[in-house]
Amino acid sequence: MKKVIFSLIALFFAGLTVNAQDAATPQPPVDPNAPEIVFEKTVHDYGTIVQGADGTCEFKFTNTGKEPLILSRPTSSCGCTVPTWPQEPILPGKSEVIKVTYNTNNVGGINKTVTVNSNAKTARIVLQIKGTVTPKPTTTMPEKPAEQVAAPVSK
């Protein structure tokens, strides 16, 4: 009896799996007038920078579509990377920038992403920043040689 119940349960789940794979998700038709977002670059390489250096970079883009482009709130892969984006719609043919600021107080490798969502034909684009932050060089005060130390004047 247990074998029969187990077999029926297995067949039920197998049927669900097959149905889930057969059901194709219909894609909405692409609007030929929709905005199109084209970035000059999608990867920014800081190279090697020193701890505490300016970690701001810009990703310039253009709306090459026929309708205004509206960006949703871009999201970063961590709290150490903060994107700033235009809040107003970008008209066709106009360019704007998304500024990304990385906290360079963190020493080590940089490999972070910012996901940009919009109403463009390509609704999601991932921007990447990479590089390496090296520790700030330590500065020490040079010691004065013994002969240059001031001595009291004798009368």
Image (cartoon, rainbow, N blue to C red):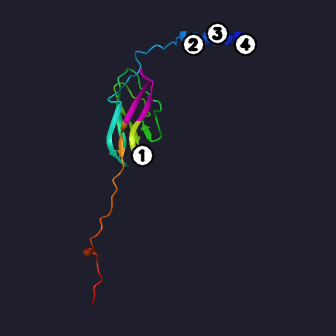
Distance (Cα) linking label 4 and label 3: 14 Å
| Residue name at image x 30 percent, y 83 percent | 152
Marker disc for residue 106? 1
Distance (Cα) linking label 3 and label 2: 14 Å
Instruction: Give the residue number, with chain letter if any, for mark 4.
Output: 2
The magenta span reads: 112-129
Residue at the extreme bottom: 155
Instruction: Give the residue number, with chain letter if any, for mark 3.
Output: 11
| Residue name at image x 47 percent, y 30 percent | 72
Q: Amino acid at mark 1?
A: Asn
Q: Secondary structure at mark 1?
A: loop
Distance (Cα) linking label 4 and label 2: 27 Å
Q: Secondary structure at mark 4?
A: helix
Which is nearer the eye, 84 or 93?
Answer: 84
Quarter of image, res 14: top right
Distance (Cα) linking label 4 and label 1: 59 Å
Instruction: Give the residue number, with chain letter if any, for mark 2.
Output: 20
Q: Residues within 10 Å of mark 3 (few under 14, many from 20)?
A: few
Chain-order first, disc 4 or disc 3 = 4
Position of residue 50 in the picture relative to residue 10 (left or right): left
Percent x, y of residue 78: 47, 38
Q: Amino acid at mark 3?
A: Leu
Q: Amino acid at mark 4?
A: Lys
Q: Secondary structure at mark 2?
A: helix
Chain-order first, disc 2 or disc 1 = 2
Q: Residues within 10 Å of mark 4 (few under 14, many from 20)?
A: few
